[in-house]
Image (cartoon, rainbow, N blue to C red):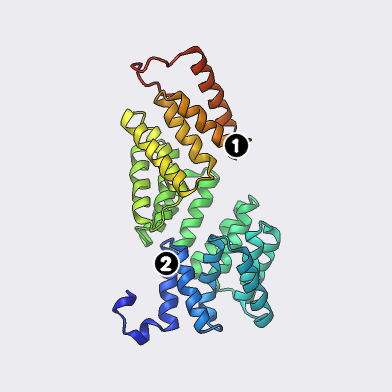
């Protein structure tokens, strides 16, 4: 830990770069950005920290800053892979994946051992549903950095996206063996178990993901809420409601969290709250077919008084 280092070494750019990388890998992108920014303020030519600095900016969606860095670095270092990696990250952020892919490919061509470019290259392919090319890029990254869990994680996510659950579980378990308490790995394993209908195991993995994350994501709580609903118990529904409330606190503009919260209230026969939450979700995301269907169902039930009796047993939908 940095506080245990001598003051001169604690302020050293290389030590701070390692600290920023640790923050990035633990999912604390704000701290990664803060530390890496300090390094670059002291030494603008510290190219070694640029990959994690730019990657943290991508996660924080700071488009203008990424554009500024990409513009400066490509002008100053046109023969460095990190310059074109920065340019690719900007186009990735603005969802121009074809251009992003071209720049990531250029970065990988300049430095074939630049793992960050290969991973980003895979992401750009994945966004175009080009699974084979994405997997090839991730596998290249795994060969370049056999000790890193990230390529294994992204291969597992890609297999999960294409519903190849056995392969997804295999690669995500491999990622977990390299970094046992990575929150994103635990979350994705929880999703795999959910899709395999292993709901108890899914709940435990998702709780572990939330505990392991310094800044738990809204998606972690939403996933936990859905897994708890599948337990089909009163306690599970109450816990799911609290999980969706946490998700909503993390991102008040999330329609998914509101739909999940509305569904939990619906299962608990609290139709007024469910109807209000479905309406709020649809105000944020008008094309949510599930929210619209459940809103219609809740309105009909309220109209006929189907669940008006407060002593009626809970009905799982």
Residue 88: x, y in percent? 64, 66
Q: Position of residue 104 (x, y in %)?
A: 64, 67
Please report the residue visible at 65 percent of the width from the left and 69 percent of the height from the top.
Answer: 67
Residue corresponding to mark 2: 23
Mark 1 highlights which residue? 283
Res 148 seen here: no
Q: Could you give the CA–CA distance between mark 1 and mark 2, rounded to whole angstroms?
A: 36 Å
Please name the residue shown 33% across and 38% down the image.
Answer: 200
Q: Position of residue 42 (x, y in %)?
A: 50, 83
Q: Residue at x 55, y 82 (%)?
A: 44
Compare residues 302 and 19 and report the one nearer the observer: 302
Vertical order, 18 against 181 (above or below) = below
- The quarter of the picture where the N terminus appears is bottom left
Q: Are marks 1 and 2 in contact (CB under 8 Å)?
A: no
Q: Earlier in the sequence, mark 1 or mark 2?
A: 2
Please identify the residue farthest to the left as the structure is shown: 4
């Amino acid at each position: 830990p940095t506080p245990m280092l001598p003051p001169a070494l604690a302020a050293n750019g290389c030590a701070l770069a390692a600290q920023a990388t640790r923050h990035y890998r633990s999912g604390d992108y704000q701290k990664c950005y803060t530390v890496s920014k300090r390094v670059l303020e002291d030494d603008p030519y510290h190219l070694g920290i640029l990959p994690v600095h730019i990657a943290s900016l991508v996660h924080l969606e700071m488009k203008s800053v990424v554009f500024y860095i990409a513009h400066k670095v490509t002008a100053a270092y046109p023969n460095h892979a990190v310059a074109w990696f920065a340019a690719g990250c900007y186009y990735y952020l603005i969802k121009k994946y074809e251009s992003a892919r071209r720049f990531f490919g250029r970065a990988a061509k300049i430095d074939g051992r630049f793992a960050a470019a290969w991973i980003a290259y895979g992401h750009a392919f994945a966004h175009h549903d080009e699974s084979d090319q994405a997997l090839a890029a991730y596998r290249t990254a795994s060969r370049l950095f056999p000790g890193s869990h990230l390529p294994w994680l992204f291969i597992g996510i890609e297999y999960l996206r294409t519903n190849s659950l056995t392969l997804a579980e295999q690669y995500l378990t491999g990622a977990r063996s390299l970094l046992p308490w990575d929150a994103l790995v635990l979350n994705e394993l929880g999703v795999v178990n959910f899709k395999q209908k292993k709901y108890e195991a899914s709940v435990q993995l998702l709780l572990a993901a939330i505990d392991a994350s310094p800044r738990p994501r809204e998606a972690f709580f939403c996933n936990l809420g859905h897994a708890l609903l599948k337990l089909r118990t009163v306690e599970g529904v109450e816990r799911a409601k609290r999980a969706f409330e946490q998700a909503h606190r993390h991102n008040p503009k999330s329609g998914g969290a509101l739909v999940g919260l509305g569904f939990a209230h619906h299962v608990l026969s609290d139709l007024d709250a469910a109807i209000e939450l479905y309406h709020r979700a649809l105000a944020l995301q008008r094309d949510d077919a599930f929210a619209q269907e459940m809103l219609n169902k809740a309105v009909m039930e309220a109209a006929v008084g189907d669940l008006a009796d407060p002593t009626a047993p809970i009905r799982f939908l």
